[in-house]
Image (tube, helix red, strand yellow):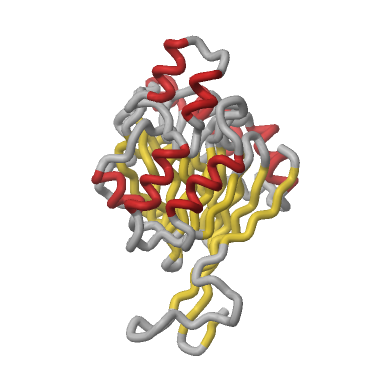
Amino acid sequence: MSDKGGSLVRVRVLVAGSGSSGNALVVETPAARILVDAGIAPRLLAARLAALGSHLFPRSVDAIVPSHVHDDHFAHAEPLARALRAPVFLHRGIVAPRLRDRYATSHLETGAAVAVGDVLMECCAVPHDADQIALRLTAGGVTFGVATDLGHVPGSLLAFLGGCDALLLEANHEPFLLRESAYPESLKRRVAGPLGHLSNEQVADVLARLRGSSVRSVYLAHMSRTNNEASLALAAARAARPDLDVHIVPHGRTVTLDVVVAHGPRSGAVPRRPGQLALPLRAGEAEG
């Protein structure tokens, strides 16, 4: 679709689950499908994608990219590799000797780009208590980022995220809810620590620091069911950046993100129809 010298480019993101109960999303482009994270079993993943109108079989996926080895992101890596017969892209922080011995694997290196179909994948190290990466996936001029399970955002990661048009970002907890929760004190310290998970306050700070970057839309994800509330996360993010298009990915729910970027002539403003944001994201939800 074009508009007076510009064009509207779409990338479809199917979130099959986000949160401690299991993480997996599929990025779909005209020439590739990439599964990010392997925290949901094949049958359930297929059912959730079908609820979003996308069938996992027989097309399968072109790559499986786990972010780290915690169970909610990695527990089903072997069953998915077997069922989908797709290569698993592993960064050096994922040892997984059995997975490497039994299934097709490829290497994903921070600072280097890897092409899968029409998608260019890049990764950046994330501060977490397991070796973890954030991802940027670019197709047709659209860059979608995924950054969850991080205790803080250093400058290197901030620069990486600033290169995204749209971003799925962790908003795990509200500090006072975490303090008052029934979690053991050791777990509270882990979640709130510099290698744990982002709070709503930290997310607001990250978004403020991303002012002037390419980011136009943000989906807040990996939210705790007990230590956060959607209204609190949204309020903090929107107070920090009222100019951003900010939405919630509910815990354990399936969501379709239709990432639409309007590209226009570099010399002028981005052309768009009246009422259309430069980068609107539209979500359709079904029970997960």
The tally of labels here is 0
Task: Tell me residue 129's x, y (percent).
Answer: 35, 23
User: At 63% across and 40% down in the image, what residue appears?
Assistant: 250
Pick the residue in front: 185 or 21: 185
User: At 53% across and 49% down in the image, what residue appears?
Assistant: 219
Relative to 166, say whether 141 is above or below.
below
**Residue 78 shows in this picture:** no
Image quarter of the N terminus: bottom right
Figure quadrant of residue 117: bottom left
Figure quadrant of residue 132: top left
**Residue 239 shows in this picture:** yes
Pick the residue in front: 63 or 158: 158
User: At 32% across and 27% down in the image, what residue appears?
Assistant: 194
Relative to 185, say whether 223 is above or below.
below
Task: Tell me residue 287's x, y (percent).
Answer: 75, 40
Relative to 160, say whether 91 is above or below.
above
Task: Tell me residue 92's x, y (percent).
Answer: 30, 31
Figure quadrant of residue 153: top left
Pick the residue in front: 240 or 11: 240
Taking the image as shown, residue 283 lies to the left or right of residue 98, namely right
Image quarter of the C terminus: top right
Taking the image as shown, residue 52 lies to the left or right of residue 5, namely right
